[in-house]
Image (cartoon, rainbow, N blue to C red):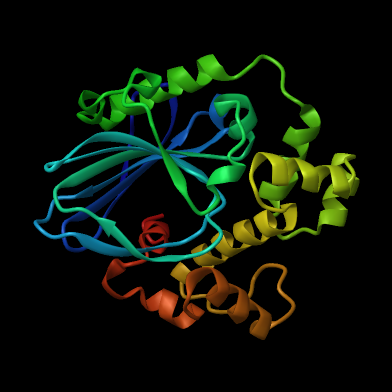
């Protein structure tokens, strides 16, 4: 289903997906002024009486979660880059989480601190981070507006255009590009780029590109395309890489039994 949202702080494409067992997922894309830093705003709600078992998949994003549930206090959690699947994730019963998914450029220019110490991990932030509270989770539209205002207030007037260019090339190719090619296009040495990635994000540039390529492949798999469409050497390489990051082969991902791969389910709504 496609809805329109009046806010000028997010794009007009407002997609909603309903999944099985009382799980609801909604995603909004940011407006153009935030597109270099924010991938999306989204919510995930479990209305059922049971915890939902899920498998978390790496996607090359940094997620800022605002979470409340019937039996837990409001909390705000920042997740660093994920490089592996997590097979025992739980969405608690009667819980709601709003989130902002950030692109890596936001680490330096929005959060203004390294996240190298929370690879495949996260940290709990202060309960009043960005002046948010549990009441801000009453309206998803208001949450998007408030978050957008806050992010815009944090972005400096000037950013390193070399870094912007680097991320533009990575995202345009969905990570299907070599470090050497990126060095030539961005005018930045491979050594300098890798130092920047390791210091800021805790992973190598090559691994980040592989994560984005994996995520792009999920969109193809969700549509039943169980063969490589990006820069994989061959079918064997494709299957190996998909299993490395998801724990299963493409065929099992496509089946997505019980919608346990939430990220994959979200692609089927678009």
Q: Is residue 112 left or right of residue 75?
A: right
Residue drawn at x 65%, y 83% is 235
Q: Classify 254 as above or below 13.
A: below
Residue drawn at x 48%, y 32% is 30
Q: Position of residue 156 (x, y in %)?
A: 64, 16
Q: Residue furthest bottom?
A: 236
Total number of numbered discs in the rendering: 0
**Picture quarter containing residue 238?**
bottom right
Residue drawn at x 44%, y 17% is 149
Residue placed most toward the observer, 169 or 85: 85
Q: Classify 138 as above or below 63.
A: above
Q: Is residue 174 visible?
A: no
Q: Is residue 233 left or right of residue 188?
A: left
Q: Position of residue 135 (x, y in %)?
A: 20, 24
Residue drawn at x 16%, y 57% is 22
Q: Is residue 240 visible?
A: yes
Q: Position of residue 43 (x, y in %)?
A: 31, 42
- On-image quarter of the C terminus: bottom left
Residue placed most toward the observer, 116 or 152: 116
**Picture quarter containing residue 209?**
bottom right
Q: Residue furthest front?
A: 117
Q: Classify 146 as above or below 215.
A: above
Residue placed most toward the observer, 176 or 90: 90
Q: Residue furthest left?
A: 49
Q: Is residue 69 left or right of residue 28?
A: left
**Picture quarter containing residue 174?**
bottom right
């Amino acid at each position: 289903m496609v809805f329109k949202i009046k806010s000028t702080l997010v794009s007009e494409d407002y997609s909603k997906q309903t999944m099985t067992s009382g799980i609801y997922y909604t995603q909004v894309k940011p407006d153009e002024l935030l597109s270099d830093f924010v991938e999306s705003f989204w919510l995930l709600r479990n209305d059922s009486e049971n915890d939902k078992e899920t498998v978390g998949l790496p996607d090359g994003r940094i997620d800022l979660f605002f979470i409340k549930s019937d039996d837990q206090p409001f909390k705000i959690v920042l997740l660093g880059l994920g490089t592996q699947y997590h097979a025992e994730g739980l969405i608690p019963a009667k819980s709601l989480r709003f989130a902002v998914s950030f692109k890596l450029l936001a680490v330096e220019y929005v959060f203004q601190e390294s996240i190298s110490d929370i690879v495949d991990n996260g940290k709990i932030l202060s309960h009043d981070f960005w002046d948010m509270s549990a009441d801000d989770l009453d309206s998803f539209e208001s949450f998007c507006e408030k978050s957008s205002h806050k992010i815009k207030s944090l972005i400096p007037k000037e950013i390193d255009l070399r870094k912007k260019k680097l991320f533009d090339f990575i995202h345009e190719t969905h990570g299907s590009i070599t470090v050497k090619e990126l060095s030539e296009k961005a005018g930045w040495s491979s050594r300098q780029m890798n130092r920047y990635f390791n210091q800021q994000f805790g992973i190598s540039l090559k691994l980040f590109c592989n994560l984005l390529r994996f995520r792009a492949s999920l969109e193809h798999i969700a549509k039943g395309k169980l063969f490589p469409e990006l820069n994989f050497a061959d079918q064997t390489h494709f299957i190996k890489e998909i299993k490395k990051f998801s724990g299963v082969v493409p065929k099992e991902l496509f089946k997505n039994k019980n919608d346990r791969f939430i990220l994959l389910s979200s692609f089927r709504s678009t």
